[in-house]
Image (cartoon, rainbow, N blue to C red):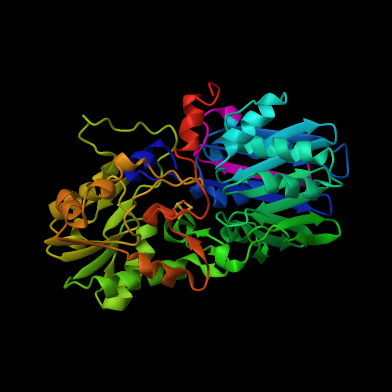
Amino acid sequence: MNEFDRVSTGLGEECGVFGAYDMDGRNVATSIYYGLFALQHRGQESCGIAVTDTFGKRKVISRKGLGHVNDVFNEETLSELKGNLGVGHVRYSTAGGTRVENAQPLVINYVKGTLAIAHNGNLVNALELRRELEYTGAIFQTTIDSEVIAYHIARERLNAPNAESAVKNAMKKIKGAYALVVSSPRKMIGARDPLGLRPLCIGKRDNTYFLASESCAIAAVDGEFIRDVRPGEIVTITKDGISSDTSMSLPAEQEARCIFEYIYFARTDSTIDGVNVYHSRILAGKALAQSYPVDADLVVGVPDSGLVAAKGYSEESGIPYGMAFHKNSYVGRTFIKPKQSDRESSVKVKLNVIPEVVRGKRIVMVDDSIVRGTTCANIIKMLKKAGATEVHVRISSPPFLYPCYFGVDVPSNEQLIAHSHTTEQIRELIGADSLGYMEISKLKDMVGDLHYCDACFTGKYPMEVPGRDISFALEEGDYQNE
Ligand code: SF4
């Protein structure tokens, strides 16, 4: 999510990881490029690819940069990335600032060779671990906690019999959310945190294996989805196939997948842990229609993540579904964000109402969340200006009340409108005729039997969390003063 998006919705996405290993020795950089392209919605700030040739000198070549996958890579740069094993990353900065050094994958050279690592998620104990490493002489080149993980893996490797054991030993120390893809000289290793907060799955095409944050990326490279990496599982992919270690996994009832992946982050064509994202959003819309029925003429969704929930609301209520907005998708990193004084609001340059669709109609508008409330208020104003007679807002998540410590950029409490206002006050502030949020008790309908995290709505974190946001501390640099 770029600066523009951050302003317009107030919620930051996380990161996306993708790995590829061609056992026949063909170059994988282009496949990684397409995989990352399919994961672009998870992070638009920077991206990178690191490859190695397992049949040759096993040197790691990498390229990283600020911007979209399209900005950083072209045919020429991809052709320079020769290697049959590689990892890639798209980044949104939830921890660490917008600097090219913070782009991933990270490549670490150490006595046992070179490893490249791509990480999605946030650690809750990154500060302690960093401090511990620095006291023993480590010098960090980035401000991201992914480097803490990389160092731990490298350090553990000195005494572990193989790279996957080193990953496992590092997992015993790191706490928080992580989906990791690691390339060590002749292996591709994938690991998912024991709670399963962040997704990771495995795919295959001919003799090439893939690891990806979401199944949509496996489909993008014409791969066949094999399965999800289980929470707490370490998978090691070599020429002999896939081996698995689940000794770090927890009983299913302790797992805590991020429910927001289903509500907002993941692409609708992805399936995570057996639950299709499109389907779960349809169910969210249906639940909203059951909880908050209203007499109206048309149900519309706010692009993109509100669209499917709107369809679910329409199916359940019998009110026709329509397209009220045109979205301009071409907002890149260098887009000049309107200032408050400009007549063009950030919302207007990205979303336009189609007046012919909404004029004279009572509208049900479905969106995924209200963070600060300003975007929602602007959209309602636009609908009414275009002739909508009523706008009833339905939100497919419960009110945001608490920060996320696991890699999702939910703003601090003071900025969350629901933190200081009742639903009725919010309705009035945004100018809606009625407002209904997804009920917390109905979130479970979206994901079947899966156990999930809903801490940003309930404050019940699935693990102990620090008193303040780690990324904030790192940005301020106060960690060095401790
Ligand atoms: Fe996801 Fe919210 Fe839990 Fe963060 S706190 S992992 S955003 S459900």
Look at the image and give the residue range highlighted in magenta.
82-101
Numbered marks: total: 0
Residue 161 lies in magenta, yes or no?
Answer: no
Image position of 441 (left or right of 348): right
Q: Residue at x 60, y 34 (%)?
A: 128
Quarter of the figure with residue 86: top right
Task: Establish if 358 lies above or below 328.
Answer: below
User: Where does the image place residue 205, in percent across and percent down from the top left?
Assistant: 73, 61
Q: Is residue 272 visible?
A: no
Whether residue 406 sits left or right of residue 302 in the image: it is right
Looking at the picture, tell me which residue is in the foreground, 438 or 34: 438
In this rendering, is residue 197 above or below 123? Answer: below
User: Residue at image x 39%, y 58%?
Assistant: 305
Q: Split into 4 quadrants, where in the image is the C terminus?
A: top right
Please identify the quarter of the rendering in which residue 330 is found.
top left
Foreground: 466 or 185? Answer: 466
State the residue in front, 404 or 21. Answer: 404
| Residue 377 in view in this figure | yes
Question: Residue 144's x, y, as percent?
Answer: 58, 34
**Direction top: furthest residue:** 481
| Quarter assignment of residue 4 | top left
Q: Is residue 160 left or right of residue 147?
A: right
Q: How far across and how far down the image is residue 32, in percent?
A: 66, 48
**Residue 3: % across, % down:** 40, 36
Quadrant that contains the N terminus:
top left
Per the image, is 90 magenta? yes
User: In the displayed structure, would residue 148 be above or below residue 247?
Assistant: above
